[in-house]
Image (cartoon, rainbow, N blue to C red):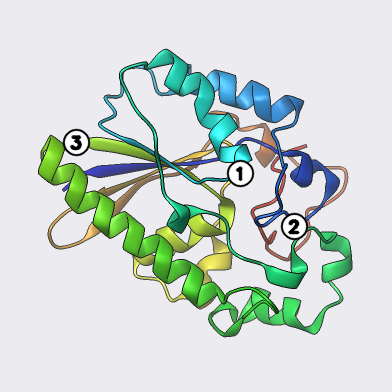
Amino acid sequence: MPTLILVRHGRSTANTAGLLAGWTPGVALDERGTEQAAALPGRLDGLPLAEIVVSPLQRCQETMRPLLDARPGLTPRTDDRIGECHYGDWSGRKLAELKDEPLMEVVQTHPSAAAFPGGESLREMQTRAVAAVREWNARVEAEHGPDAVYLMCSHGDIIKSIVADALGLHLDLFQRVSVEPCSVTAIRYTRLRPYLVRLGETGDLASLAPRETPPDDDAPVGGGAGAP
């Protein structure tokens, strides 16, 4: 079965503003996110990609633009099922404000029970994302062979939930996974089990150095802005 390359979109204006973007329209890459996207073709150089599947949201579409320019033979496929979680009434709000919401404790410690008012549950999000991966695995294998490699450009919580599924982790543990903006995660699927072969690879180890302001113990809902 194919190998899936998961790319989180580059850093966005919502990431740097501390907003939970969700499906809010008009959220674009910021200057650093644009630089991250521009560097992506070089990072993936030499890797044969059979297909590129993209979230419909602007920040993912912008992240893929340089890669598609570098590989003009590929036509991107848009799939709503790998679009960001529908955060409902939380969309567009500041994460600092949301920390005081009682639901945030559930999102952090018991995410399988978390449902966003006016939106979807994290269980529903994972179900649609994993279903998309399974269907694309079958399609890519049928059209390009069992050794094919394909790419999905998606969002932090989506990628974390797909990784949790691949590792056989309960959704309640998915907050232990971290994927920074424009990071690359790779999962090799086989008939019997998936193998996580890369997780959150950015090529930059600077984010591991001690920070002046220690990072929050909570998992960043939506994926966070990455290293400062």
* Residue 101 falls in image quadrant: bottom right
Q: Which of marks 1 and 3 is nearer the N terminus?
A: 3
Q: Which amino acid does label 1 sit on?
A: Glu
Residue placed most toward the observer, 166 or 156: 156
Residue placed most toward the observer, 56 or 167: 56
Q: Residues within 10 Å of mark 3 (few under 14, many from 20)?
A: some
What is the C-alpha distance between the residues marked 3 and 2? 35 Å
Q: Mark 3 points at which residue?
A: 148
Q: Which residue: 58% across, 63% down? A: 85
In this view, 95 is above or below 69: below
Q: What residue type is labelled 3?
A: Ala
Residue 125 lies left or right of residue 191; in this view the side is right
The reply to whether residue 146 is in sight is no
Q: Mark 1 points at which residue?
A: 180
Q: Which residue: 57% across, 56% down? A: 84
**Residue 52 screen position, x and y as percent:** 36, 35
Q: What residue type is labelled 2?
A: Leu
Residue 212 lies left or right of residue 28; in this view the side is right
Q: Name the residue under label 2.
A: 20
Secondary structure beneath disc 2?
loop
Q: How crowded is mark 2: few (under 14 residues within 10 Å), some or many (20 or more)?
A: many
The reply to whether residue 63 is in sight is yes
Q: Which residue: 78% across, 53% down? A: 215
Q: Which residue: 62% across, 35% down? A: 10
* Residue 70 falls in image quadrant: top left
**Residue 128 screen position, x and y as percent:** 41, 66
